[in-house]
Image: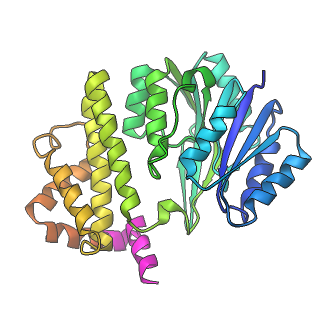
């Protein structure tokens, strides 16, 4: 049996795909299959994938019509033969021992999920998630709490999963944003044990044209359906995590409210109204919930008092701190 299946959804990444694939092929372990899913690319990405497959018999290429990253990951998962499954974004870079460490830990601690630290590289900014050379073990409840609190990243690329743990879990094709969060929520809900070795072993590259840098659009609203579904699941199955799930939903609504206020309330008035109603439903909850971010508690209190005052202060703060919100607005004006 193959030790590891690595699934890479590819869509118009010809400029970066070679470096990504090379970083996978240079891994310090060799017992893996690499499944490249060309999701209807209109550039030379598909041809580059085929070229690599000719050089290395561990590579399988799937060509499909463009259906989105969730569909591409699902297509890869369905044919994966490995004992463990990992996902990589097509423009990112792996450290040479990443999968050696993840597999060693998942075996050593008899875990269902193994996680490593991440370096997030965006234009003019680098953030480290981990890097303290610590290892933490989570049981099922601790893992779910870790996801809601942000201690465990919402992403898939920094993790491997025992195949039998996630065999019945798939990405939601309707979710173009937060598809990772829902998958990880379901995986952690199923996992008995998770190990997190916070050594930095993955470079997550945020490009100027990446979705995380894009202006607010209707796509973002799909994430709120995901967070609401997570709340409903906790209400039905995980009552001890209801407050955490609601705080998670509240915090995401606040993030999107801030995006709209900085960019344009007028342009996104419909979405603005929906988010206002979502937040209003928490008016008796957010102040007392220990999991709601303090800045969002203060921010929403001010917003309820005066939306105009809050928007003005937010724009000043975003400008002074050169926040991602203001950078998105700058791109809109270019």
Q: Is 51 placed above or below 259 here?
A: above
Mark yes or no: residue 119 visible. Answer: yes
Magenta-drawn stretch contains 321: yes
Total numbered circles: 0
x and y, in percent, of residue 176 in the image: 47, 52
Would you identify the image quadrant in which residue 143 lies? top left
Which residue does the image show at 14% across and 40% down from the upper left? 285
From the image, which quarter does the N terminus lie in?
A: top right
- Taking the view exactly as shown, the residue that stands out farthest to the front is 65
Report the side of 292 relative to 180 (left or right).
left
Q: Is residue 213 left or right of residue 207?
A: left
Residues 145 and 76: in front is 76
Q: Residue at x 63, y 54 (%)?
A: 65
Q: Nearer the viewer, residue 63 or 157?
A: 63
The single residue placed furthest to the right in the displayed view is 55
Image location (x, y in percent) of residue 205: 61, 57
Eyeballing the image, is 87 above or below 107?
Answer: below
Asked if residue 125 is positioned above or below residue 145 in the image, the reply reads below
Question: Is residue 157 at all visible to an observer of this figure?
Answer: no
Dominant SS type (magenta) = helix
Q: Residue at x 72, y 27 (%)?
A: 82
Q: What residue span does the magenta drawing correspond to?
A: 317-334
Q: Quadrant of residue 329?
A: bottom left
Residue 36: where, in percent of width, then height?
Answer: 72, 46
Image location (x, y in percent) of residue 63? 71, 50
Q: Nearer the viewer, residue 52 or 308?
A: 52
Residue at the (36%, 61%) spot, across then down: 218
- Magenta-drawn stretch contains 39: no
């Amino acid at each position: 049996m193959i030790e590891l299946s690595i699934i890479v959804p590819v869509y118009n990444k010809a400029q970066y795909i070679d470096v990504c694939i090379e970083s996978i092929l240079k891994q310090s372990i060799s017992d893996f299959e690499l499944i490249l899913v060309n999701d209807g690319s209109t550039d030379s990405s598909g041809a580059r994938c085929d070229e690599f497959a000719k050089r290395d018999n561990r590579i399988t290429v799937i060509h499909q019509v463009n259906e989105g990253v969730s569909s591409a990951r699902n297509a890869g998962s369905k044919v994966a033969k490995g004992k463990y499954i990992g996902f990589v974004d097509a423009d990112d870079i792996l450290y040479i021992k990443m999968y050696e460490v993840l597999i060693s830990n998942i075996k050593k601690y008899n875990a269902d999920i193994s996680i490593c630290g991440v370096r997030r590289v965006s234009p003019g900014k680098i953030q480290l998630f981990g890097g303290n050379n610590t290892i933490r073990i989570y049981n099922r409840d601790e893992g779910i709490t870790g996801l809601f609190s942000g201690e465990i990243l919402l992403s898939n690329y920094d993790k491997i999963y025992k195949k039998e743990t996630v065999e019945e879990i798939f990405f939601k094709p309707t979710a173009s944003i937060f598809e990772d969060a829902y998958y990880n929520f379901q995986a952690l809900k199923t996992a008995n044990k998770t190990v997190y070795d916070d050594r930095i072993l993955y470079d997550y590259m945020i490009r100027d044209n990446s979705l995380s840098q894009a202006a607010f659009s209707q796509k973002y609203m799909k994430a709120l359906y995901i967070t609401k579904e997570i709340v409903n699941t906790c209400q039905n199955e995980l009552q001890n995590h209801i407050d955490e799930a609601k705080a998670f939903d509240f915090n995401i609504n606040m993030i999107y409210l801030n995006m709209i206020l900085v960019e344009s309330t007028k342009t996104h008035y419909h979405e603005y109204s929906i988010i206002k109603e979502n937040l209003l439903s928490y008016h008796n909850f957010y102040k007392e919930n220990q999991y709601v971010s303090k800045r969002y508690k203060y921010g929403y209190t001010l917003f309820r008092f005066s939306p105009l005052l809050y928007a003005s202060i937010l724009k000043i703060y975003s400008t002074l701190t050169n926040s991602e919100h203001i950078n998105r607005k700058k791109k809109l004006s270019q």
